[in-house]
Amino acid sequence: MYKALISFNYIYYLNKKYYFLLENIPNQSELMKLAITGASGKTGFRVAEEAISAGYDVRLISRSQSDIPDSIKKCERYFLSDTNGVTLDYALKGCESLVIATGARPSIDLTGPAKIDYLNIQKQVESCKRQNLKRVVLVSSLCAGKLIHPLNLFGLILIWKRLGEKSLQNSGLDWTVIRPGGLNENESNLKDQNILFSGEKTQEEGSIPRRLVAKSCIDALRTKESIEKIIEITSSEENPKITMSKAIKTFNI
């Protein structure tokens, strides 16, 4: 009986030690250094907030010293400039993943989409390859690549977005493209908004809060099945509640 008691106590000790170790193993996101380009933008800063909540070590990258919310001011921040000597390669050094939240806005500058949504994406992709950064999520747009569309009045913006997507797709990196519908900043009823996840060229209209786009970017980083996928997203109260991972498997995205 004495021997049995010793054996029991030893097994209890081992189990207790095992569970202690399990409880103290950080999750994958806590180990990952995440860079966000376009971090001062309306979608970018939300991506940063969601990444912080998920446990990522966040680095903000932008081209201007724009105001950002207090919630992300403690993050590392790099300002890219032709005069301050900070290059994109330097800003991405040591990072393991990147969310690209840069994007041209409809404006009278018809060269903007080509520069921002194509050439700038190319530069970011090449910099990732030089820095051995493998995982990239790109925020694009619903209807990317569609020629006949009102948005193309602004410098063929959807055509350049598709070319930017292709530069990432052909990069050899572990990529995901998120194509949101019309963006809004309504966060009053997020709990009632369910995301409709679908594959390429399956949605042509609909809207989604920027907050849910940001959450989808982080979900993509944490969802292995999203690699090498173009995922279109809109939201409404009528959509069934489903995770990105399950949607990819269920709907063969």
Image (cartoon, rainbow, N blue to C red):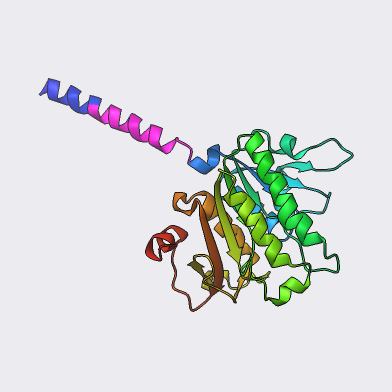
Q: Please give the range of residues in magenta.
A: 11-27
- Report the side of 176 relative to 82 (left or right): left
So how many labels did they put on this image? 0
Q: Nearer the viewer, residue 5 or 210?
A: 210
Q: Is residue 148 above or below residue 85?
A: below
Q: Nearer the viewer, residue 190 or 113?
A: 113
Q: Is residue 117 above or below residue 37?
A: below
Q: Position of residue 162 (x, y in %)?
A: 64, 61
Q: Quadrant of the C terminus?
A: bottom left
Residue at horizontal 72 percent and vertical 61 percent from the top: 42
- Report the side of 97 relative to 27 (left or right): right
Choose top left, top right, bottom left or bottom right for residue 143: bottom right
Q: Quadrant of the N terminus?
A: top left
Residue at horizontal 82 percent and vertical 61 percent from the top: 111
Q: Nearer the viewer, residue 75 or 118?
A: 118
Choose top left, top right, bottom left or bottom right for residue 163: bottom right
Say if residue 156 shows up in the picture.
yes
Q: Nearer the viewer, residue 165 or 196?
A: 165
Q: Is residue 80 above or below residue 111?
A: above
Q: Position of residue 216 (x, y in %)?
A: 55, 59
Dominant SS in magenta:
helix
- Report the side of 61 relative to 189 (left or right): right
Q: Is residue 205 above or below residue 161?
A: below
- Residue 26, magenta (yes or no): yes
Residue that protrudes farthest toward the bottom in the picture: 238
Q: Position of residue 176 (x, y in %)?
A: 55, 53
Residue at horizontal 66 percent and vertical 34 percent from the top: 130
